[in-house]
Image: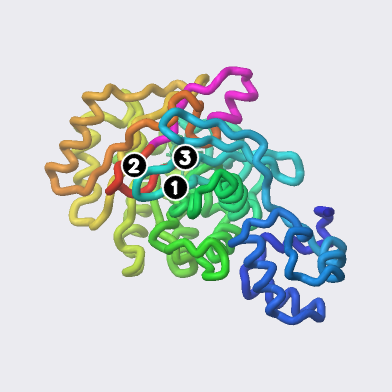
Amino acid sequence: MSDSSALSDLSSLTRPELERWFARQGEKPFRGRQVFRWLHARNAASFEEMTDLSRALRARLPELAWLSAPAILEERQAGDGTRKYRFGLRDGLQVEGVYMPEERRRTLCVSTQVGCAQGCRFCATGTMGLTRSLSAGEIAGQLEAVSRRLAAEGLARPVTNVVFMGMGEPLANLEAVAAAVDILLDDFGPKLSRRHVTVSTVGLVPQMEEFVHRVPAKLAVSLNASSDEVRDSIMPVNRRYPLAELMRCCRNLPEQHARVTFEYVLLGGVNDSLADARALVALLAGFPCKINLIPYNPCPGLPYERPEERRVVEFGDLLAERQLSVFVRKSRGVELGAACGQLLTQARRGTPGGCAPRSPRPDEPPSPG
Ligand code: SAH
Ligand code: SF4
């Protein structure tokens, strides 16, 4: 199989696109549906596996097309069932994903870019800069590779929820993310419920407006501060889209996106005071939303600390007392080393893992990797 750019990447096409592609090759469009099902429901990794295509067609496809879906290079499992994956892309680059099984749902956190251009000061991925964006096939393919692996272990429906909270800023790769969501929701593919797919953004306002009109998934916004002063100091994006503009956008979202989830990473001594909590209450006053408080996973080399446990509780209590819907994440898979991005940066420095992905409570919205 070749990845020459002259060939079509069939993993990245939505079902209608794949049907049109087959029609252009002089084949019946339903071949497109068949191949789509092989790739995204049966998790095939090669044309060879597609045994209900004719031998001639299977032999011809590699001359016309390739599959961009990634391969699992490494899997680490923690005592609580959390699994951390390192995926290899066809050009040798790598991204990460985290699988978090719980009683009522099994969530996979996927990456959307190799690195990230947004440069949030506290984030391991932010320190890498952006190498490139992933294709739709590389994004959806993370689910397929993990599902294939877990199915081989006998798990029937191994992944019920997907969160776009791994490496990268999804809305800086909107075309591919929109196609990947279409693939994940397709009845002939993984067939996930739209309520079970969440895309997290750093707060790119114009792309958020486009997203809510185009993409049927849920939106989560990484707020992380309640004043421009603090947000400017930890998230460069805030200089482009300051809080007033971000909140105006969130308050004007169409009905189906009206109840936004805000993520708030608690950084010890930076944004975790009770004054910060009160400012957050004022910022979100009268706005129907959920808040996920995420105690920071410290990353070697970055000057931020995990907040004190007592402070996390007080911060959450203050929000709850003011009638905000708030959830506090607990750590999972601590020994794995990592929220997304942290495993790769640690591997580069030659240090073992030490950061932890998060886990929601059963009634809580999904968590980031
Ligand atoms: N780029 C998107 C999605 C990926 S980051 C975004 O920023 O929303 C997903 C979430 O992980 C974000 O809320 C981010 O603030 C958070 N995060 C990043 N590094 C973290 C760390 N070390 N500890 C805890 N949360 C972290
Ligand atoms: Fe990029 Fe999200 Fe990390 Fe910010 S927090 S650098 S947007 S991945």
| Ligand 1 contact, mark 3 (Cβ < 8 Å) | yes
Residue at the extreme front of the image, as rendered: 154
Sooner in the amino-acid sequence: mark 1 or mark 3: 1
The residue lying at 68 percent from left, 60 percent from top is 11
Q: If the picture is divided into quarters, which one holds ligand 1?
A: top left
Q: Is residue 154 above or below residue 39?
A: above
Q: Which residues are magenta?
A: 342-358
Q: Is mark 1 within 8 Å of ligand 1?
A: no
Name the residue nearer the viewer: 153 or 203. Answer: 153
Q: Which residue is mark 1?
A: 107
Mark carried by residue 213: none
**Measured Cα–Cα span from mark 2 to mark 3:** 11 Å
| Within-10-Å neighbours for mark 3: few <14, some 14–19, many 20+ | many
The span from disc 1 to disc 3 (Cα, nearest Å) is: 10 Å
Horizontally, is 142 left or right of 163 in the view? Answer: right
Label 1 and label 2: CA atoms lie apart by 10 Å
Q: Which mark is residue 360?
A: 2
- Between disc 2 and disc 3, the foreground one is 2
Other-residue count near label 2 (Cα within 10 Å), few / some / many at <14 / 14–19 / ≥20: many
Residue type at mark 3?
Gly
Q: Which residue is mark 3?
A: 369
The vertical placement of 156 against 357, above or below, is below
Is 34 drawn above or below residue 171 in the view shown?
below
Dot 1 falls on a residue whose secondary structure is: strand
Q: Are marks 1 and 2 in contact (CB under 8 Å)?
A: yes
What secondary structure is marked by label 2?
A: loop
Q: What is the quadrant of the N terminus in the image?
A: bottom right
Residue shown at 21%/24% (left/top)? 310
Residue at 64% x, 49% y: name it.
133
> Label 1 amino acid?
Thr
Quarter holding residue 71: top right
